Image (spheres, rainbow, N blue to C red):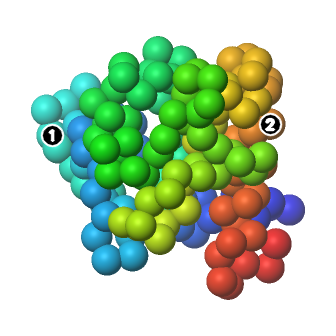
Amino acid sequence: MFTGFEKLVLDGTVRFHAGFLKSLEAEDDRLVAGYRVRAKREIADIRADWLVNCTGMERAGISHSPLLKEMSRFQLIVPDPLGLGIQVNAASEVTAPSRISPARLFAVGALTAGQFWEITAVPDIRVQAKAVAEEIVKARPDSDA
C-alpha cells in the first residue's frame, strides 16, 4: 500500500530535481524556480505550486545565499527572530508577509532552526520532511489523505 506522498511521486505530481537554485519568481499563482542542473551548465525552470527548500546547513542564513537574499527582498521570506534561518510556523510553512505570491512555501532543516532549534540531524529532518510532504498532500484539492 502506497502512502499519499508515494502516490504523488508515482503519478509524476512530485518530481525531484538536483541542481543549484539561481532564481525564484512569482508567475500568476505559481512559483518559477530557475536552476542550474547538477553537473551540467544547463539552466532549467520549474513551475510549481509549492517550494520546499532543502539546501542544507551551509545555506541556513539569508545572507549566505543569493536565492534567499532575493526571496527576502521580495518578502517571500523573513529572518526568524533569532537570526538562525527563516521564519516558519509549527508546520514548517514560511510565514513571511508576502503579497506577491499566494503559493505556500515550506522549509526544512537548518533554515527552520529558529522555530525547531536543533533541527540538524538527519533523523529529525526526515521526520520534518515527512510532515511537510503530508501537509502538501492534504492541501491538494483531489487528495483523499
Is 111 located above or below residue 134 in the figure? above
Q: Look at 31% across and 77% down and name the residue there.
A: 28
How crowded is the residue under tag 1: few (<14 C-alpha within 10 Å), some, or many (20+)? Answer: few
Determine the secondary structure under disc 1: loop
Residue 8 lies, in percent from the top left, at 63, 65
According to the picture, the residue beneath numbered tag 1 turns out to be 42
Do tag 1 and tag 2 residues touch (Cβ < 8 Å)?
no
**Looking at the picture, does residue 117 appear above or below residue 102?**
above
Q: What is the three-letter code of the residue carrying label 1? A: Glu
In the rendering, at what x and y percent does residue 101 appear? 41, 67
Q: Decide if residue 23 is on the left or right side of residue 132.
A: left
Among all residues in the image, which is located at the extreme right? Answer: 1
Q: Quadrant of the C terminus?
A: bottom right
Q: Earlier in the sequence, mark 1 or mark 2?
A: 1
How far is the residue under mark 1 from the one under mark 2?
A: 33 Å
**Of 126 and 73, the residue lying toward us:** 73
135 to 43, vertically: above or below? below
According to the image, label 2 marks what residue? 127
Density class for disc 2 (Cα within 10 Å; few <14, some 14-19, many ≥20) is few
